[in-house]
Image (cartoon, rainbow, N blue to C red):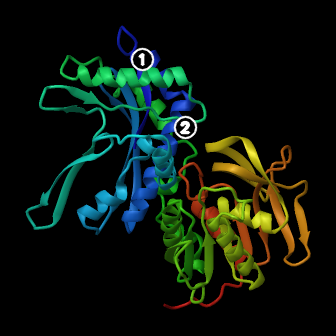
């Protein structure tokens, strides 16, 4: 994933300019969000071993970007990999599936080759498939008459300034046109630049940077259990599945609209997704609401994340409110049932509670982790269930696997059932 843009001044890049760019929270947030989106894709196509490397400074003719690299082990055919990884969230928005619906609604014409792919596909010396591919951005499409068309865009986040984003697109066009000219002075190896890049990873989720060898040892009671993860149109669920597998669980992922059997699973994880959680007239919301209600009444152990957390809160009778400003890749420290945690939020709606406990007439005592000033609910836990508004699987959450393990163990009430076998 590549995002965040430093537009060079007329005199070229300077150390002060590069360091100012690396410390800009708007640019930092922009890269974190696309890192999460690309981790979703990689978690979907890789069985295991997904790992983040970086960040790095990517210097070009007229501007510089920040980037991470994501590595993983995959057994899929290259055609399936291309299908699953198109299109980049930096050129569509996220979640990608919902963003494409918005593009179809508001863009009257196609984008041509912009954001497509060019790939060299073949086989290596052993006969195994290999592929080298690149996204078609900063690319000139030249027709037979010699006319060139350059597609450009800018990533919008909550801190975006419209004039600045438009200026960024002009610089991107200029960088293509001047690609054959002499390049500017490079700063990527300067010690202060390297230090600023290293600081970007402070408090990010270490799991995605390869620190996971002892994850299963942290939750030995979960090893061998079977989990069903419900995808509510956000492939964050693929990242949840990666972390659950690292904790020793066997994981099945099913789309919310697919038929699925809860029997044979020790735990259900109701996943995140877009939509208004308070509108049961929406087919997806109504279905998730019914499923969560059924899990509660049947005393099936489950964990709910983000949208599913909001729907659970609605079922429990808590108020749902549209946030004045959406949490769009927002990282902050919260008190999670007495433990300080740095976590990542992506939500437009939030549940509110005036107190830390709720005595529900049907489902018993519910403990609530909340912002004491605003009343926004961060998490809940009760008899056989727990939920979180934030994303434990996000790279923005420092201790995601540990949080998941702790909440799952709580859901199972420390008396873990015998593992279900397929």
Viewer-proximal residue, 96 or 416? 96
Rendering quarter of residue 226? bottom right
Tell me which residue sits at (50%, 57%) in the image.
207
Q: Position of residue 143 (x, y in %)?
A: 16, 32
Q: Is residue 170 left or right of residue 408?
A: left
Q: CA distance from mark 2 to mark 1?
A: 21 Å
| 399 w.r.t. 57: above or below | below
Please name the residue that numbered disc 1 is placed on.
15
Q: How many marks?
A: 2
Please name the residue that numbered disc 2 is placed on.
29
- Specify the farthest residue to the front: 108
Q: Quadrant of the N terminus?
A: top left
Q: Position of residue 258 (x, y in %)?
A: 52, 76
- Specify the farthest residue to the top: 11
Instruction: For the residues labelled 2 and 1, say whether their Cβ atoms are less than 8 Å apart.
Output: no
Q: Is residue 7 left or right of residue 232?
A: left
Query: Can residue 413 be seen at all in this image of the molecule?
Result: no
Q: Position of residue 26 (x, y in %)?
A: 56, 31
Mark in the foreground, 2 or 1 = 2
Q: Earlier in the sequence, mark 2 or mark 1?
A: 1
Viewer-proximal residue, 353 or 276? 276
Tell me which residue sits at (46%, 37%) in the image.
198
Query: Can residue 353 be seen at all in this image of the molecule?
Result: yes
Viewer-proximal residue, 312 or 287? 287
Q: Position of residue 96 (x, y in %)?
A: 47, 52
């Amino acid at each position: 994933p590549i995002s965040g843009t430093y537009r060079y001044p007329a005199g070229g890049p300077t150390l002060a300019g590069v360091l100012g760019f690396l410390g800009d929270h708007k640019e930092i947030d922009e890269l974190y969000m696309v890192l999460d989106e690309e981790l979703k894709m990689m978690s979907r196509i890789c069985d295991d071993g997904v790992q983040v490397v970086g960040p790095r400074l990517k210097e070009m003719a007229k501007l510089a970007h920040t980037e991470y690299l994501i590595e993983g082990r995959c057994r899929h055919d290259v055609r399936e990999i291309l299908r699953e990884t198109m299109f980049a969230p930096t050129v569509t928005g996220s979640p990608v599936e919902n963003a494409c619906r918005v593009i179809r609604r508001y863009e009257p014409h196609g984008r041509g080759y912009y954001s497509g792919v060019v790939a060299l596909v073949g086989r290596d010396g052993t006969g195994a498939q290999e592929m080298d591919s690149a996204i078609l951005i900063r690319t000139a499409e030249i027709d037979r008459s010699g006319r060139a068309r350059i597609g450009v865009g800018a990533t919008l986040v909550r801190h975006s300034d419209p004039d600045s984003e438009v200026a960024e697109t002009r610089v991107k066009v200029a960088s293509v046109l001047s690609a054959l000219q002499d390049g500017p002075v490079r700063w990527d190896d300067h010690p202060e630049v390297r230090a600023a890049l290293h600081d970007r990873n402070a408090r990010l989720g270490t799991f995605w940077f390869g620190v996971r060898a002892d994850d299963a040892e942290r939750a030995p009671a979960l090893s061998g259990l079977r989990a069903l993860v419900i995808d509510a149109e956000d492939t964050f669920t693929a990242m949840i599945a990666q972390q659950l597998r690292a904790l020793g669980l066997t994981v099945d992922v099913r789309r919310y609209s697919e038929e699925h059997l809860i029997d044979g699973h020790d735990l259900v994880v109701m996943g995140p997704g877009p939509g208004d959680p308070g509108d049961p007239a929406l087919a997806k919301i109504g279905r998730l609401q019914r499923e969560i209600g059924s899990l509660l009444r049947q005393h099936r152990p489950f964990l709910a994340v983000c949208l599913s957390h909001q729907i659970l809160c609605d079922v429990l009778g808590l108020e749902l409110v549209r946030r004045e400003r959406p949490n769009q890749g927002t990282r902050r420290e919260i008190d999670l049932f007495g433990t300080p945690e740095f976590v990542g939020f992506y939500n437009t709606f939030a549940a509110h509670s005036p107190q830390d406990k709720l005595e529900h007439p049907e489902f018993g005592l519910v403990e609530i982790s909340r912002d004491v000033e605003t009343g926004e609910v961060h998490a809940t836990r009760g008899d056989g269930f727990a939920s979180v508004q934030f994303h434990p699987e996000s790279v923005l959450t420092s201790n995601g696997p540990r949080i998941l393990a702790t909440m799952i163990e709580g859901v199972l009430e420390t008396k873990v059932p015998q593992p279900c076998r397929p």
